[in-house]
Image (cartoon, grey):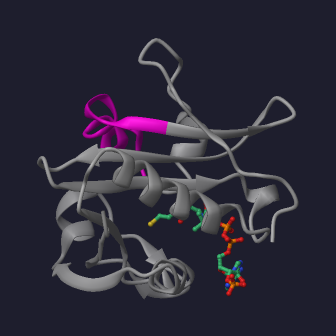
Amino acid sequence: MFEYNVITRRCSKEEEIPYDLLLLADETIEAINRYIHQSDCYVFEHQGQLLGLYVLFPINNHCIEIKNIAVLESAQGKGIGTLLIRDAIQKAKEQSYTTILIGTANTAFKQLYLYQKEGFEIDDIKKNFFIDNYPTPIYEKGILLNHMIMLKKTIEQ
Ligand code: COA
């Protein structure tokens, strides 16, 4: 587990958007721009370096979605992603949301493991989401990235 507390800070709308990190979880700036301006971005910084972030996008008064979550490559595998997921659930709870969603690709086995470990359940599949929304086919480890798997967690208030 990560040796420091992961305390996040909500970015102000005036701050530069941290596209470098956001692009670890999304293929294009265009895709990020479809949600980032209507979302809150929470960052985790350590010794002046941005190590991780997540983005919360309200769907309605009850439901919020983690649209992006990313940890700097050199800091991955140390528990930061797990703590960011927990922090996102806590922030949603503090804002009285009762459901939190996260979507990931059919090819994202590590992410599917992480989200289910943290209590999310597969709820829906957006068939051909990546085919329809991205200009060229994307392959990961030889598998076509096509469907978006949506996972959901109920937040006890
Ligand atoms: N292969 C398989 N499992 C791995 C792994 C790897 N390379 N690296 C870590 N894991 C496991 C860990 O063992 C841990 O499980 P455990 O608690 O049972 O040990 C779990 O995955 C989470 O690891 P953690 O260190 O908390 O996550 P992280 O800090 O690496 O962050 C991501 C996870 C997904 C946010 C990070 O990998 C990332 O930024 N990836 C690129 C962007 C991305 O794909 N975002 C999600 C889009 S849906």
Identify the image quadrant of the C terminus: bottom left
Residue 115 inside the magenta-drawn segment: no
Task: Give the residue drawn at x 84%, y 53%.
Answer: 4
Q: Residue furthest front?
A: 157
Viewer-nearest residue: 59 or 17 = 59
- Could you say where residue 103 lies in the image, as x and y percent from the top left? 32, 69
Task: Give the residue drawn at x 25%, y 32%.
Answer: 38
Viewer-nearest residue: 106 or 40 = 40
Task: Give the residue drawn at x 57%, y 82%.
Answer: 110
- Could you say where residue 101 lies in the image, as x and y percent from the top left? 29, 66
- Could you say where residue 73 lies in the image, as x and y percent from the top left? 74, 58
Q: Which range of residues does the magenta coloring cover?
A: 27-41
Q: How many marks?
A: 0
In the depicted structure, whether residue 44 falls above or below residue 75: above
Q: Is residue 121 left or right of residue 7?
A: left
- Could you say where residue 147 lies in the image, as x and y percent from the top left? 26, 79
Q: Residue furthest left?
A: 60
Q: Is residue 119 left or right of residue 100?
A: right
Residue 26 visible (yes or no) = no
Q: Quadrant of residue 124?
A: bottom left
Viewer-nearest residue: 2 or 71 = 2
- Split into quadrants, the picture shows ligand 1 in the one at bottom right
Q: Quadrant of residue 57?
A: top left
In the depicted structure, whether residue 110 falls above or below residue 85: below
Q: Is residue 7 left or right of residue 18?
A: right
Residue 41 visible (yes or no) = yes
Residue 35 inside the magenta-drawn segment: yes
